[in-house]
Amino acid sequence: MPDVQSMVNEFVIKLKKRKVEGSKSTAKLTAELLRSFISQQRLPHSNQAGALIDAVKAVGEKLIAANPVELAVGNVVRRVLHIIREEDLSLTTAAVGGLSLAAESDDENDTEQDDHPVLSATAVAAAARNALRPPSLQTLLEDIPHSAVAPPTSSSGGDSEGKSKSADKNSMTRKLKHNVIEAVNELIQEISTCHEQIAEQAVEHIHHNEVILTLGSSRTVMEFLCAAKEKKRSFRVFVAEGAPRYQGHAFAKELAGRGLQTTVITDSAVFAMISRVNMVIVGAHAVMANGGVIAPVGLNMVALAAQRHAVPFVVLAGVHKLCPLYPHNPEVLLNELKSPSELLDFGEFSDCLDVGSGTGSPLLHVVNPAFDYVPPNLVNLFITDTGGHNPSYIYRLIADYYSADDLVVRRKSAS
């Protein structure tokens, strides 16, 4: 089996060099890496979940720091941390419940030990809440006199009991890792099939003779539109070209190749054409906790045009793009500046250098941002692999998939 630390370092280099493109690919690779990392972890006999969480957090900070703009990395890291907490809580609750039942059974069968306390519902709940201290069972029992928990035994019996406890701890560790890995496998499957799950809902939102507007290129939007076409929906698609990389050109060509009536328009023509449009359907780079969207540059303009003409603005995003952070959080980088060469050739740019001043400083500056921020009030509907949701419902989804304690995973400041 390859060294997991080498795998982590290789993935960090890929993230830094931007060799992994697309939130879906990044999220899937991150989840697969964390699965391998967890499978090779050697956990202590006590506080297994806490040790595993600390280890995953350490790796997660490295991954997030490698490409802080790709929020899908942090999303997956926090999802895995949430999985560990949930699985540990489930195992702890089951163990405490079994202990409570055993104590009740002993109390019923042994009339000579009527004064033995039975674990109350409050104690069980307290142990379940304290899921990050697997010795929580031990901690709970330490508050009960030893004679009230188990009758005195001989030294040989004590040795046997010690071996049994050690075996139980090893079994508990294996069970925790097994359950976590199985849950991470489900997460990977969820990420892999998000396009199909979203596309299945297309027929509910796209109807005959409608005109759909989109911008740039999105694999999720592509599958969504093609799924509606396969359901015999007849509609037209306007594609804004998505300058300066003009990804909309290739996107429109692929749509036409798959049998959809497609029209390419310039980005500046969106306001002129929006009155003919029935719905705007776009992809997203990330969805923030407040329902705001980090999307390819130009989409805020499209959202404003849609609101001005009362055209529904629909965002397609897999659950792995839901980010539990807010746009104002300091660890969130909303933008990334791309190469100026996408706007101007170097030869054109070099003509604008102030050679006469002797410094060679440019008189012309090129700013090429990659993303826009679309506030939640401009979004009418989110369609995820779990269904359609209003922007105000995003916080509920965040609560289902993330733990509040795991939001402290941040990118490390550059040293």
Image: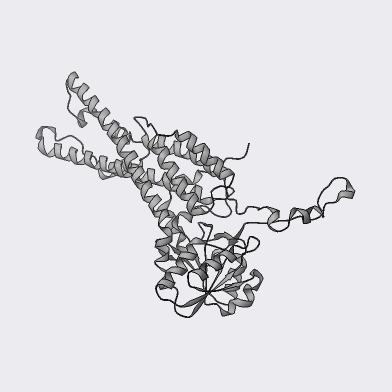
In the picture, measured across the screen, residue 234 lies left or right of residue 361, that is left
**Residue at the spot 50% in from the left edge and 65% down from the top edge:** 315
Q: Is residue 218 left or right of residue 230?
A: right
Q: Position of residue 108 (x, y in %)?
A: 12, 39
Q: Is residue 414 visible?
A: yes
Q: Residue at x 17, y 40 (%)?
A: 104
* Horizontal and vertical percent position of residue 225: 47, 69
> At which x and y percent is residue 340?
70, 54
Residue 377 makes an appearance in the image: no
Residue nearest the observer in this picture, 207 or 138: 207
**Where 163 sits versus 177, above or below?**
above
Q: From the viewer's perspective, is residue 352 above or below residue 108?
A: below
Q: Position of residue 85 (x, y in %)?
A: 38, 43
Residue reaching furthest to the top: 155
Q: Is residue 51 left or right of residue 137?
A: right
Q: From this view, report whether residue 237 is shown above or below residue 285.
A: below
Residue 400, by quadrant, is bottom left
* Residue 190 image-quadrant placement: bottom left
Name the foreground residue: 4 vs 153. Answer: 4
* Quadrant in which the C terminus appears: top right
Residue at (54, 41) in percent of width and height:
12
Instruction: Work out which quarter of the rendered image holds the N terminus and state it.
Output: top left
**By what rule are the colours in the image chosen?**
one colour
Residue 176 is left or right of residue 266, and the answer is: left
Q: Residue at x 70, y 59 (%)?
A: 343
The one of 226 and 117 positioned closer to us in this rendering? 226
Counting every numbered tag in the picture gives 0
